[in-house]
Image: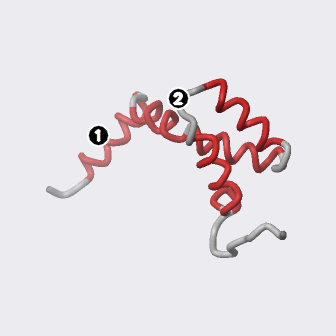
């Protein structure tokens, strides 16, 4: 069976990437089971594809880190100051 590719989507949002993310995320918060599922996915996906999978799995954490950064807060304040109220 050939992997289904949707041309309108970027590589990191292809069905096989999202399926792997869902498969790994499904066992959360059981870390041991998640590591087992990550190892299973590594047998079927390339290093680059696994990088996409792992990035999507930690995306919420990254957003929280950015949101809490001084740089983001300064940018938000600057954008609010430039907006006509």
User: Which residue is under mark 2?
Assistant: 29
- Please determine whether, in this image, residue 61 is positioned above or below residue 32: below
Secondary structure found at label 1: helix
* Quarter of the image where the N terminus is located: bottom right
Which mark is on residue 68? none
* Residue drawn where x is 76% and y is 50% of the image: 49
Identify the image quadrant of residue 74.
top left
Disc 1/disc 2 C-alpha distance (Å): 36 Å
**Residue 59 at x, y percent in the picture:** 54, 41
The colour scheme applied to this rendered structure is secondary structure
Identify the image quadrant of residue 84.
bottom left
Residue situated furthest left in the rendering? 85
User: Which residue is under mark 1?
Assistant: 77
- Please determine whether, in this image, residue 66 is positioned above or below residue 22: above
**Residue 57 at x, y percent in the picture:** 59, 40
In the image: residue 76, left or right of residue 66: left
* Residue drawn where x is 67% and y is 56% of the image: 12
* Quarter of the image where the C terminus is located: bottom left
In the image: residue 10, left or right of residue 70: right
Mark 1 or mark 2: which comes first in sequence? 2
Q: Please tell me how many numbered marks the rendered image carries.
A: 2
| Label 1 Cα crowd, 10 Å radius (few <14 / some 14-19 / many 20+) | few
Secondary structure found at label 2: loop
Nearest the viewer among 83 and 15 is: 15
Nearest the viewer among 19 and 60 is: 19
**Residue 25 at x, y percent in the picture:** 57, 41
Residue situated furthest bottom in the rendering? 7
């Amino acid at each position: 069976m050939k992997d289904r590719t949707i041309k309108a989507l970027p590589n990191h949002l292809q069905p096989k990437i999202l399926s792997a993310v869902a498969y790994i995320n499904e066992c959360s918060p059981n870390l041991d089971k998640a590591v087992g599922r990550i190892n299973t996915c590594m047998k079927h996906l390339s290093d680059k594809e696994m990088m996409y999978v792992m990035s999507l799995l930690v995306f919420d954490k990254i957003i929280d880190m950015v949101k809490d950064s001084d740089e983001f807060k300064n940018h938000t304040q600057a954008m609010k100051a430039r907006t006509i109220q």
